[in-house]
Amino acid sequence: MPTDLMTEAKHLPAVPPEAAEAYEKHLQLLIDQVNDTLEAHPDIHRLIGYNPLDMMYANHQNHARFMVNVFKYHTYELLVTVARWVYRTYHAHGFEFDYFPNELTAWRDAVKARLDASKTPEMIAVYQWMLDRHPAMVESSQEPRKDTRDMDPAWQETIDAFIEALLEGDSQNCLAMAEDIAKTAKGLETLYLEVIQPSLYEIGKLWEADDISVAQEHLATAIVARLMATLFPHLQTAPDKKGRAVVTTTTNEFHETGARTVADLLELDGWEVDYLGVNTPANELLRFLKEVKPAILLLSVAMPFNIDRTSDVIETIQATPELAGLKIMVGGLAFSLDPELWQITGADGYAPDARGAVNQARIWWKEA
Ligand code: B12
């Protein structure tokens, strides 16, 4: 990526907190205006590659939620990374690059039209910068991408075979391969981290490049969920009992396998785990935590647009006297691009993968 985008992004003006709040408060109004503007564009169907309009609406919804995070936390480097991903992925799915300046103009104009003028200069400057840098963004989005996780070459062949079986929907073969690796707790950890995780990352890249359909990606994830449920209960947990841990995600976060991997490996290490699955409403999570009083809470975040929801939950928990002493760990793909990013959530700790999560939990257990 040309470094000037990142360097320039660092110098974008910080949006004052009350302006970021106004953007969030009027989010639906802004989204509606942007949807209306683009829908009325005479060439909109060509611009979005003759995809259903719903795909464009989903992009606007995600854009708005993401920009709330950018404006709140001034994460402009993350803005460049995600914008680059949006350009690359939507273009691979048929969107013309010309759609983006139209979209960004609509956002800039909606901010101008719908929000109090005293609150808008910094936000307009950010949108204007994105518009001005459109040609550089197109160029940057076409460069080879950096992998989020290196594959261990020793596992390459197994991963290739596993992905092939996943995409063919051959769950029996996937299960047979998985059973071979996961005969012990360490084997299960190896299966999860050296085979399943890189395989799903690769599936994500194939979806991103439009080489596989959403249905194939769902099929792969569903097979993984089934085999995790089959293998895990047969393994012995560590003898020392370590306390109670709650694992989940906040609302609107639907990526489950990472959280489930963390939950399974903690349980094997002797934690009594309450795995709540995904998309847990903040008030319900709070109620549950007050009831079960765990030693640690682990929150998984894959989508950068869910970081603010996670930090809001953490803030509420930390302001609840009955939950004093509860240690909170965050992790997930949203934090993998920048090792410092997790700190804006206010959590007590972070780990880049499930192995790291177990190690950090052990440290807290020993300290307690
Ligand atoms: C499967 C999948 C889905 C499924 C999830 C179904 C399910 N039941 O889980 C569905 C279809 C719902 C989905 C939806 C979307 N997805 Co999706 N999805 C994926 C995919 C292919 C696999 C995710 C996965 O399971 N990974 C494997 C796990 C094991 O890895 P992990 O989550 O990173 O977890 C590890 C670590 O991060 C860490 N960790 C995780 N949680 C925690 C928590 C703690 C406390 C700690 C310490 C550590 C930790 O430990 C884990 C194990 O080592 C990824 C590709 C990818 N790179 O992951 C895309 C991906 C994450 N999705 C993506 C996108 C864009 C979306 C959508 C916006 C698509 C859309 N247009 O609607 C929506 C958003 C939905 C939402 N609001 O949450 C993008 C995100 C890109 C970006 N810029 O951030 C990705 C990267 C695909 C891609 N290559 O472009 N998705």
Image: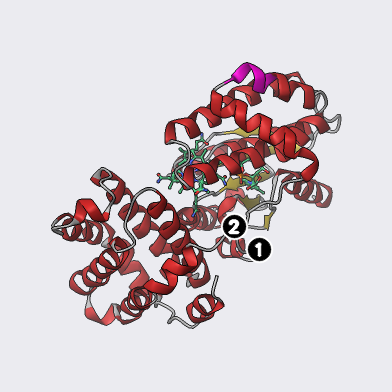
Residue 215, given in percent of the width and then of the height, sits at: 43, 31
Relative to 168, is 52 on the left or the right? left
Instruction: Say few, some or many: other residues with alpha carbon within 10 Å of mark 1 (under 14 / 14 to 19 / 20 or more).
Output: few
- Residue at 82% x, 52% y is 367
- Which mark, by number, is residue 73? none
How far apart marks 1 and 2 lie (CA) works out to 7 Å
Residue 33 x, y percent position in the rendering? 19, 60
Q: Residue furthest top?
A: 172
Near-viewer residue (116 or 364): 116
Mark 2 vs ligand 1: CB below 8 Å: yes
Q: Is residue 29 visible to the viewer in this orientation of the structure? A: yes
Relative side of 228 to 9, left or right: right
Secondary structure of the residue carrying tag 1 is loop
Relative vertical location of residue 105 with respect to residue 162 in this rendering, above or below: below
Q: Name the residue tied to disc 2.
A: 335
Say which quarter of the image contains residue 106: bottom left
- Magenta-colored span: 170-175
Farthest-out residue, right: 239
In the image, 143 versus 162, the foreground residue is 143
